[in-house]
Amino acid sequence: MDFTVALAQIKPKLGCLDDNMALAEAAIEKGIAAGADLVVFPELALTGYFLKDLVPEVALRLDSPQMEKLKKLSERISIAIGFVEVSADFRFFNSAVYLEGGEIRHVHRKVYLPTYGLFDEQRYMARGERFRAFDTRFGRIGMLICEDMWHLSAPYILAMDGAMTLICLSSSPGRGVTESEGLGSAAAWQKLTTTTAMFLNCRVFYCNRVGYEDGINFWGGSEAISPSGEMTDRGAILEEDFVLAKVDGGALRRERIFSPMMRDENLAITVKELKRIDREKGC
């Protein structure tokens, strides 16, 4: 089916849950008014990124009033949004929730928590333990959160689980400047999203935030990538934006016929060889 996705490239306020919830609601209403079918937000859109000791203060349960409000809004438009989730045993996760038809359809907990350079996520949050695709009105979808996508096995697992669309929620800081490619982190992500889409014959919706926290900037550049690896729509760099991307449902069918990577993928060989490597390493 053809549909329209809105990439809400917003600027969350650090630790300000109420303000960010209002910002999200405004973007959702904007998406509805524009005729979008799905709106995607960045990683930790409801809280800001460099939370550190604020994590317990802004964490939400899945039955919180904020989630109930988002569930109600999802009766009018599908929503993918990032937040801090608290579990029943008081662990905190960098999570993304997908809501549709008034229900939570899926929750992904970030598996790969970066602890290098600017990042110290694992000090404050617990790691997710799975990658699962799930069914939506747009077909089967998989969600990733920022660093997850840099581990080749993550999008591969989702594709093998039937995902034809990957949604990546991100809070990527601007790092590195080159004469030929401009902002280094932007160039790196653009290569990653297009390559992932091309090799897995899938759509990629990447939503990155903007703004500053503790003197560190986030560069935006949210984009929609077709199953052929072509960038069809891209948001502004270093500025808030609201990207509306019209998705041609037939493009995925045509690409999978023209370049049948997923048809020819041999999962049995992959599983067999990974088990061999696991045995030989004594894991």
Image (spheres, grey):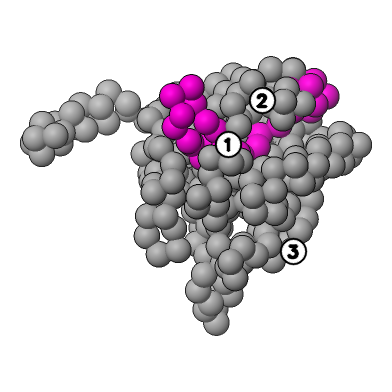
Residue sitting at 69 percent across and 43 percent down? Answer: 17
Q: Tell me the number on the disc at residue 64.
A: 2
Q: Residue 171 location, x and y as percent? A: 57, 53
Res. 55 visible in picture? yes
Q: Tell me the number on the disc at residue 239.
A: 3
Is 219 left or right of 200, judged from the image as shown?
Answer: right
Residue sitting at 53 percent across and 44 percent down? Answer: 55
Residue sitting at 66 percent across and 25 percent down? Answer: 64
Tell me the quadrant of the picture where the C terminus can be found: top left
Q: Secondary structure at mark 3?
A: loop
Sequence order check, earlier mark of 3 and 1 = 1
Q: Alpha-carbon distance for marks 3 and 2?
A: 31 Å
**Residue position for label 1:** 59
The type of residue carrying mark 3 is Glu
Q: Secondary structure at mark 1?
A: loop
Q: Residues within 10 Å of mark 1 (few under 14, many from 20)?
A: many
* Dot 1 and dot 2 residues touching (CB under 8 Å): no
- Residue segment shown in magenta: 70-95
Sequence order check, earlier mark of 3 and 2 = 2
Q: Residue 190 location, x and y as percent? A: 56, 58
Residue sitting at 86 percent across and 37 percent down? Answer: 29
